[in-house]
Image: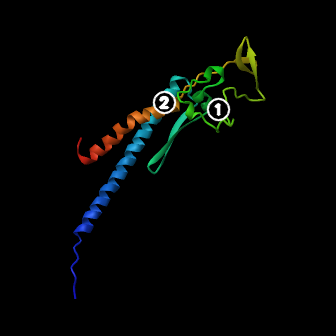
């Protein structure tokens, strides 16, 4: 006894799976390119402010990636400090509730108890850092700007990768 099985449906299914597998690879290539582009953008932003000690990198995780900045006082540059910095971050909803420094919420008058103390001088709130009175700095928001840059650029880079593969370009 013999049976004939039509495998054309299975062959079609295999082609579809291969196509989607290639699409995922293309998406990953686009994501890596976008991350590299965003990293360069953020590094350029930090260097404009003279923060050469801050480095930017990214880590891909499947279909997501984390882009991060690290270095001395990066949180202070990002979110601002003192009365000068309060309210200067582009989106108050993104202020950290933990991290560096761990304050329970972003504190514009965070001080190092060993080296500084809060004070008001000539009606200006600030703190003494060693022998220098400081009023704070506005938020530079480089990583926030990098996120905005990614939002503007993502569809361009992703489209470019898919158009290459489909032969539309």
Comes first in the chain, label 2 or label 1:
1
Q: Which mark is residue 145?
A: 2
Mark 2 Cα shell of 10 Å, populated few (<14), some (14-19), many (≥20):
some
* SS of the residue under disc 2: helix
Counting from the top left corner in percent of width and height, residue 143 is at 52, 33
Question: Given this view, does label 2 or label 1 mark the residue nearer the observer?
Answer: 1
Quick one: 15 or 40, which is closer to the camera? Answer: 15
Picture coordinates of residue 42, whole percent (x, y): 49, 31
Q: Which residue is mark 1?
A: 106
Residue that appears at 25% across and 63% down? 12
Residue positioned 68% across, 37% down in the render: 104
Seen at 28% across and 59% down, the residue is 16
Q: CA distance from mark 2 to mark 1?
A: 19 Å
Left or right: 114 in relation to 69: right
Q: Quadrant of residue 86?
A: top right
Secondary-structure class at tag 1: loop
- Residue found at the far top of this picture: 122
Q: Position of residue 156 (x, y in %)?
A: 34, 37
Tell me the tag on residue 8.
Answer: none
Q: Choose top left, top right, bottom left or bottom right for residue 4.
A: bottom left
Residue furthest to the bottom:
1
Q: Are marks 2 and 1 in contact (CB under 8 Å)?
A: no
Quadrant containing the N terminus is bottom left
**Residue furthest toward the front?**
93
In front: 145, or 96? 96
Q: Residue reaching furthest right?
A: 114
């Amino acid at each position: 006894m013999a049976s004939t099985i039509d495998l054309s449906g299975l062959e079609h299914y295999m082609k579809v799976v291969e196509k989607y597998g290639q699409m995922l690879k293309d998406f990953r290539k686009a994501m890596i390119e976008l991350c590299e582009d965003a990293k360069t953008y953020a590094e350029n932003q930090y260097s404009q402010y003279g923060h050469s000690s801050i480095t930017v990198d990214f880590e891909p995780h499947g279909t997501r990636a984390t882009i991060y900045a690290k270095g001395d006082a990066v949180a202070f540059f990002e979110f601002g400090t003192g009365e000068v910095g309060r309210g200067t971050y582009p989106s108050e909803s993104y202020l950290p509730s933990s991290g560096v420094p761990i304050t329970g919420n972003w504190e514009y008058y965070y001080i190092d108890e060993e080296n500084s103390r809060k004070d008001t001088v000539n009606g200006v709130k600030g703190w003494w850092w060693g022998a220098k009175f400081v009023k704070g700095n506005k938020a530079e928001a480089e990583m926030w700007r990098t996120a905005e840059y990614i939002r503007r650029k993502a569809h361009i880079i992703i489209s470019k990768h898919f158009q290459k593969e489909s032969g539309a370009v």
